[in-house]
Image (cartoon, rainbow, N blue to C red):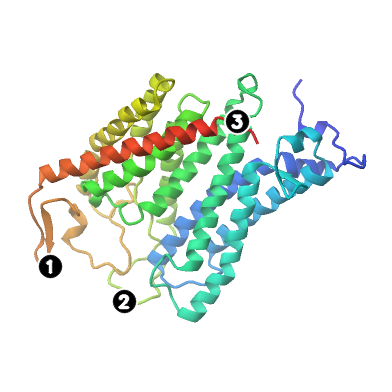
Amino acid sequence: MSTSVLDTPARTRSGVVAPAWARWLALEATIPAVLFASAAIVIGLHWDISWHRSIGRDTFWSPPHVLEQVAASVAGLLCGWRVLYTSFFGGTDADRAGAVRWWGIFHGPLGGWVCIWGTIAMISSAPFDNWWHNAYGLDVEILTPPHVILLLGMVTIQLGAMLMMLAEQNRGGAAAHDPTRSRLFATSMGLIVLMAATIVFSETSQPNQHHAPLFYQISAGIYPLFLVAVARAGRVRWPATMAALTYMVILLLLSWTLALVPATPMLAPIYNPITHLMPPAFPILLVAPALAIDLLVRRFGSGNDWRLALLLGPAVVAVMVLVQWPFSQLMLAQKMPNYWLALGYFDYGSKLGPWVKQFWDVPGISYQRGVGYVGSVDWPAVARGLAVAVVLGIVSSRVGLWWGGWMTKVRR
């Protein structure tokens, strides 16, 4: 018969039985809490971006800011309690031996320590950001010093959550493999993929940019790093595909939800009067290259990693071109705005025109004021750009294989 950690008496070093609620908070509540924090942070970030695109003016106590700080507090407090519990109030010698030690007396999981430091960064950035606005007014650039600290804290908490799920998956060896833990690990990596897409692709997320070589170069340089790593380290059958689906499902739900929330611009100039929050762009079809990654890693994963990377890089770029190139054409052919495709939504400061239905940054095609986009596609330049994407994909895949190999050894 299976037992819970609450069924096993845990005693302090003085021999006093620790309360059941204390053990539950330390040993069972931490995992769902940090996963919630990871998801809430990236959801709050998208909500905050939409808030700025739609309303413009805000305070520190805007709803997305509150969500982000609450998520950070939940992760930091529960991971902090797990450290204290393991170190002083109920952790066994085996618990302490399987934890990362700090200052000789504090013991906690590696992911828990990472979450704690991320929480400190996020919480400390709040008064810094408030002072920055009071001193310099509204942000002209998004990457102000307090925003950089905030972003680093967000990413750190997400990495900490992923490391906690990873340790739970790896602990006990193959004989104790629990598919639920492996699914949680793949899901946590999908949340990191969503964060990476939010940070890197905030300026290249529209389907208008999906014929530009730069889009494929950035995609090949970023996505394989995470998807190949989870494919190598995950113990479920399709870990990279599961991570990609997590990214796509959450982004779709965000798009469909935010587009229903009323909002009015409050910062001039207003060229595009809007009545609701701007949704993020439709997610790229990342599940297609993720499937290719899972298949290749499963087939050749035990061989030479450089050989596998040489297969993964071209495969990722080829699948993305075959899927995303025609899909973006299909999207731009639709009537705008389109709720289900999150298509045709632009900031209140945008002057709308024929450009919203055209592709941007394509070699050989240039924009002329008063005329629009003119010229024809320079296919040799496009081919050279895609060749660069393949090289970036190979390098990213090789780093992902190394990272994934390291992750298979994480137990603490």
Q: Earlier in the sequence, mark 1 or mark 2?
A: 2
Q: Which mark is residue 369?
A: 1
Viewer-nearest of discs 1 and 2: 1
* Residue placed under numbered mark 3 in the picture: 169
What percent of the width, then of the height, locates residue 341?
32, 47
- Quarter of the image that includes the N terminus: top right
The structure residue drawn at horizontal position 38% and vertical position 41%, both measured from the top left corner, is: 223
Residue at mark 1 to residue at mark 3: CA–CA distance: 56 Å
Determine the secondary structure under disc 1. loop
Report the residue that reaches farthest toward the front: 104
Q: Position of residue 135 (x, y in %)?
A: 50, 80
Q: Is residue 213 above or below residue 227?
A: below
Q: List the single residue furthest toward the right.
A: 15
Reading the image, the residue beneath label 2 is: 269
Q: Are there few (<14), some (14-19), or many (20+) residues within 10 Å of tag 3?
A: many
Give the quadrant of residue 356: bottom left
Tag 2: amino acid:
Pro
- Residue under the point 23% across and 68% down: 351
